[in-house]
Amino acid sequence: MRFQVKKEDFINCCEYEKGLATNTLKSYNYELNAYQNYLEDKLSIMDVEDIKKEHIESYLKYCYSLEEDSKTVSHKITTIYNFHKYLLREKVVKENEAEFIDRPKLAKHLPYTLSTSQVDKLFDIELKSPFDYRDKAMLELMYGTGLRVSELIGLTVYDIDFYNAFLRVKGKGSKERIVPINSNSIKYLKLYLEYRPAMLKKKNSEQLFLNSRGEGISRQGFFKNLKKLLAEKNMPTNISPHSLRHSFATHLIENGADLRSVQTMLGHSDITTTKIYTHITNEKVRNDYLHNHPRAKKEEWIYEI
């Protein structure tokens, strides 16, 4: 069976059966195209039945020769594994040739988390224009709910239930969830909504947050506005929109929130993903000890990793 045919079948399966996000589908397609080109151009392999483990390993060595980093290669291995798993499920092949491919070890990077004082500083916006009210509402909502950027900009005016104080959010894979919103977020959402009709500029958009053209704001637009705000306040440049989501989860767990509840609010399908925030809080406890206990200060070198 030709690679091109089964690749298209796999992408269709991911889109219509699994409901994967558009960005994930694009990534799968891009990486499988590169994999296909190598197999056909370098190894003259056209049919998926002819692919063996050594061919996959040869491709990965080629990727390393291009000085691709471990994270990129690991992502490619995941794509190739899922593709071959699909081929096995469809009985196109008898074995998943990617089953025992070694993955590169990845360095663990804990996400940047804002302190509560940094949150207060960032959110201290002088409200002069409708766009100030919009930015204030977006920041309050993101930190107050832990939404992903794509979820935040994807909100419509019909997704807010002020009476019951919750949002209806469409997350990864078009999965919907209900997320509670706090009184502060509600306050600034209502203030922003007073200005929103004028921002529409006679257009008919259901998107909650609008740009200067009266259309839904983009990820890039929100990121640009945040970077400008950080520069004005002389705050760390590595703070990203996602940092607010990390901070939401970390601050909840630090204050005793149940891990399962945090998992639900974040929209994580696997609680293992949520558990990274327990590592962050453990790291904070360790740092607090090292910097504040008189003995720990003197013996700090003992704890170096």
Image: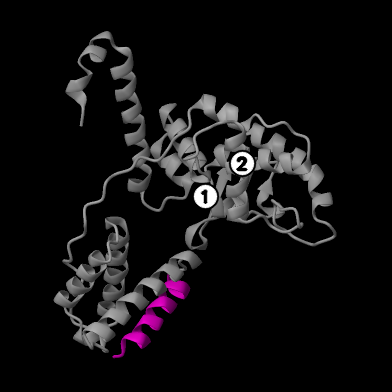
Secondary element under disc 1, as helix, strand or loop, is loop
Relative height, residue 79 to residue 152 (above, below): below
- Report the residue at 33% width, 13% height from top: 292
Name the quarter where the C terminus is drawn. Answer: top left
Give the x, y percent position of residue 33: 36, 78
- Report the residue at 39% width, 70% height from top: 28
What is the span of residues highlighted in magenta in the rendered image?
A: 1-18
- Report the residue at 36% width, 47% height from top: 273
Relative height, residue 221 to residue 233 (above, below): below
Give the x, y percent position of residue 144: 57, 37
Residue for badge 2: 228
Is 246 left or right of 158, judged from the image as shown?
left
Which quadrant of the view contains residue 204? bottom right
Residue for badge 1: 148
Spatial distance from mark 1 to mark 2, Cα to Cα? 20 Å
Relative height, residue 71 to residue 299 (above, below): below
Q: Is residue 2 magenta?
A: yes
Residue 169, label in figure: none
In front of the other: 127 or 248: 127
Which quadrant of the view contains residue 46? bottom left
Relative height, residue 89 to residue 168 (above, below): below
Give the x, y percent position of residue 47: 26, 89
Q: Is residue 181 magenta?
A: no
Instruction: Give the amino acid at mark 1.
Output: Arg
Is 140 left or right of 163, judged from the image as shown?
left
Name the quarter where the N terminus is drawn. Answer: bottom left
